[in-house]
Amino acid sequence: MRPHAPHPISLSAALAAIGAPAGPSIPPGLPTVTGITLDSRAVLPGDVYAALPGAARHGADFAPQAVQAGARAILTDAAGAGILADHAAAAGPDLPPVVVVPDPRRAVGPLARVIFDSQPDDGASPTLFGITGTNGKTTSTYFLNALLEALGHSTGLIGTIEIRAGREAIPSALTTPESPQVHSLLALMRERGLGAASMEVSSHALEFGRVDGVRFDVAGFTNLTQDHLDLHGTMDDYFAVKATLFTAARCRRAVVLVDDDWGRRLADAADVPVLTVRTAPAQAAGDTPADWTVTDVEPSGLGHTFVLRGRTGDHLRIRSGLPGTFNISNAALATGMVLASGVPAADVQRVLDASDPFTTEVPGRMQLIGEEPAAIVDFAHNPDALERTLASVRRPGGRVISVFGATGQRDETKRPIMGAVGARLSDILIVTDDDPHDEDDAVIRRAVRQGADAAVRDEGLACEVLEVFPRADAIDRAVALARPADTIVIAGRGHEVWQEVKGINLSLDDRVELRSALTRHGFSGLSPAGIES
């Protein structure tokens, strides 16, 4: 997804624009280029191929393929230059110009911004919204996109589930794509005349430079809970990475949910104007009132209605049709971000009254597959998300039956915590496999089950804990045990359609398995709607 009419620029001018120092590493007479990519398989004629060091191989190893595809220059580091010199010695000096910089990964984003002209200084580009946080990024982004469409914007979307540039949609491989793709997408959206775009911004994206060179008009923060500590190490380090989005170099203004200490800390630390949103009144006398506060929460079908009240007296009446009180927070954040972008509250209320933007289906996020029993697929894959999901689904007279596992080669400390959460909030907990990756699936299940069994034993819980695998069998067992008044929650994988086991992708879609099991056991499932991958 690139712009159809690229704007050629000399690589010398592009490097000068990002302040790359001239010298022996910048060869004279650099060619005119029209794109940049990190993937040798995605090179188009006229591209810069950015050959970066990787976990197993250096990108320079794949330079011959990039050159054959039409790369006009190669950007790399000193190690890559050595590999390229070996290639030239073996195959002849047919390489295009090689530009050597100390940290090519940090140069790629700013260079992509210049080459693709993704966010020109004249402001002729979509209003760009970015949302980060541990949980709620995807749903908040979908809510934001739906509200912007209701306001009359043609929109773009970049996130975990899909990428859209207008009505064209493709499945997404990463929560936030690599920086060349981000900038090419923004340029494509600008070329198509889109009015606004919404993007999920993961901590991995911030850590690895995937949004380098991007400046958001409004950045939003959902929450921070334990996850990704295999990458970040500590919660303080995790927070520090998230906080880099809320700097003047990356955004113009911010909207922050301040329901927890992390949100309040971020609101204080940000060096841009911040609009704060609280989903409950301040608890302590010293708490600073938020700019907007959620009040008057009432059930409405599977969802809720509520009022978002401003400190100046304004208020908005809002409805979210999706299950879970956390979707109140997601809807409030999306509303706050649109307000922060300059849309008057009266215009927002008008479209909220005329449409139902916060009932948009979000694939794999509290997605309702059946109603009797209530059968839900959700992406909850960390302790906080799982607790929020399970705590929100119990119906009068019914039981909660949960099915989940934990991902392999990820933060191991959260596995027993998730097991304990499931035991506390479920009547029947079925421990199964998530994506084991290269780890022993039995070891992962054992850690989850140990947490569940310990909670049952130590806290006197009545939860029945089962271990069933493979995952499709666990889903079938949950439905076989269910009664019409019960709620079944299949958690952890959401919209994903492949399960990775020992390097092999196995076809597995929780939504498909759950619908099939409901039919097999004499229940009715809802018809699928919208994108499912």
Image (spheres, rainbow, N blue to C red):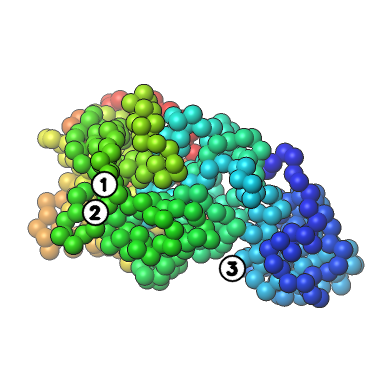
Provide the residue designation for mark 1: 311
Image quarter of the N terminus: top right
Residue 130, which numbered label? none
Residue 86 is drawn in which quadrant? bottom right
Question: What type is the residue that disc 3 sits on?
Answer: Ala
Question: What type is the residue that disc 2 sits on?
Answer: Pro
In terms of secondary structure, where does tag 3 sit?
loop
Of labels 1 and 3, earlier in sequence is 3
Q: Residue at x 87, y 72 (%)?
A: 89
Residue 289, which numbered label? 2
Decide which of 306, 338 is in the foreground and name it: 338
* Mark 2 burial class by Cα count in 10 Å: few <14, some 14-19, many 20+: some
Residue 243 is drawn in which quadrant? bottom left
Q: Residue at x 58, y 36 (%)?
A: 194
Q: Residue at x 36, y 23 (%)?
A: 354
Of labels 3 and 2, earlier in sequence is 3
Decide which of 508, 77 is in the foreground and name it: 77
